[in-house]
Image (tube, rainbow, N blue to C red):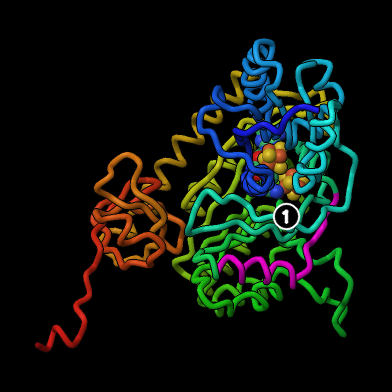
Amino acid sequence: MTPVPRRYHITTFGCQMNKADSERMAGILEGLGMAWSEDPNQADLILYNTCTIRDNAEQKVYSYLGRQAKRKQEKPDLTLIVAGCVAQQEGEQLLRRVPELDLVMGPQHANRLGDLLEQVFAGNQVVATEAVHIMEDITKPRRDSAVTAWVNVIYGCNERCSYCVVPNVRGVEQSRPPGAIRAEMEALAQQGYKEVTLLGQNIDAYGRDLPGVTETGRHLHTLTDLLYFVHDIDGIERIRFATSHPRYFTERLIKACQELPKVCEHFHIPFQSGDNDILKAMKRGYTIERYRQIIDKIRAYMPDAAISADVIVGFPGETEAQFENTLRVVEEIGFDLLNTAAYSPRPGTPAALWDNQLSEEVKADRLQRLNHLVALTAAERSQRYLGRVEDVLVEEQNSKDPRQVMGRTRGNRLTFFPGNIEQFRGQIVPVSITEVRAFSLTGEAVVTVPQSLALA
Ligand code: SAH
Ligand code: SF4
Ligand code: F3S
């Protein structure tokens, strides 16, 4: 039997679900007595938690992996693990490509890392990619932040957007019971966390796989009900959620966000394309008119709400005019933040097989034009903060300027102001905004003089 490695390193690619999974896997490794190593080259166990949403994300993994496989030839007791979405997609094939691997494990197996490692340390090469019911997590994650935390509420995705690998690699929707979510949030509050982001690839689907319907036939457990259910936890000051799907976004949810003071006025609702024919080919299940209605509704209830989204350019068959429809939507809606991507054909997805693929040149050109517009519109949206006082939840020191701390507004704008992190970490501080950039703000803490002193 190989001795248990003592130092571990995890590199995480991809989305917030992967980051949350990595934190839980790190918790499991620490539970086994291992210690974090920032430098992978000093570690005895290396875990790559991988992403396959686009080809470039996947290729990055292979280049990292190649280097460590080589290192293993000199250090045979190095344990090499590929977890996450590439692991799920490639499975056994990964072992053929990189025979040095000890463990290949899909995202549904993250909480089982301890059991799987036992098999590895007994001398086996292990592949864990079969679909499973996700175990409730009993380990304590090793969280990156001491202030904000992610809490999974639904795993997987039952949509079938024609470009997307997520349903293949994350499996069918599995909602966690509301009681388990609340219990995790209560524990977080006790540990001093101030903000929770509820996570799901399609968070509006929360609860539809759980038993129970109301008298009117509505599911008993929806995201809206969940927000009401977890809202009163003492100590948790802010609640966010992501990612929303326009197809299922309800007015009831918008009303709840307005009514519940802890729920932040920030909505991440990808629209993917501004053209109805492209949306149809993507199998998104809504029109751009419906999308605009949702945004209008949000702004009717919360005029200052921050809106962010994801967009894809260069989807198969996208014409210049259809791309311009996307530009128009970006211009008209005024997003606070937009994640943009050029379409990347993915294995096992319908759109990858179509014969109307666009050239890399056209895709790159459209992406560049879109990004240019995004920077302009985001800078314009930032202007509204100038001179205002915003509540900022302080997370960390500004890594580029130790004299400053960084935090976020309720609308999720990154904000910097002069201050000592030991004094401000975890505090919600009113900050007078003096400088605005496209994606971040700078200001000064507003010092409120206690009344007793002011009178003296
Ligand atoms: N569940 C979310 C997002 C999932 S993946 C949703 O439904 O919107 C994150 C983002 O990656 C997507 O919103 C999409 O913009 C992008 N994406 C997914 N597949 C892609 C592909 N094949 N090529 C380019 N971008 C892609
Ligand atoms: Fe992918 Fe669509 Fe599911 Fe989002 S909703 S994860 S884009 S299949
Ligand atoms: Fe990537 Fe998997 Fe997330 S493919 S975007 S890490 S769900």
Q: For the magenta stretch, what is the residue range? A: 172-189
Q: Nearer the viewer, residue 407 or 340?
A: 407
Question: Ligand 2: does it lie within 8 Å of the C-beta at label 1?
Answer: yes
**Label 1: which residue?**
202
Q: Residue at the spot x=48%, y=56% of the render? A: 146
Is residue 13 found inside the magenta-colored segment of the image? no
Rendered residue at 69%/57% (across/down): 152
Q: Is residue 398 left or right of residue 366?
A: left
Identity of the residue drawn at 56% across and 38% down? 36
Q: Position of residue 63 (x, y in %)?
A: 63, 17
Q: Residue at x 29, y 65 (%)?
A: 388
Q: Which image quarter has ligand 3? A: top right
Amino acid type at circle 1 is Asn
Q: Is residue 180 magenta?
A: yes
Q: Main secondary structure of the magenta part?
A: helix
Element assignment for label 1: loop
Whether residue 297 is situated above or below residue 32 in the rendered picture: below
Quadrant of the image for the N terminus? Answer: top right
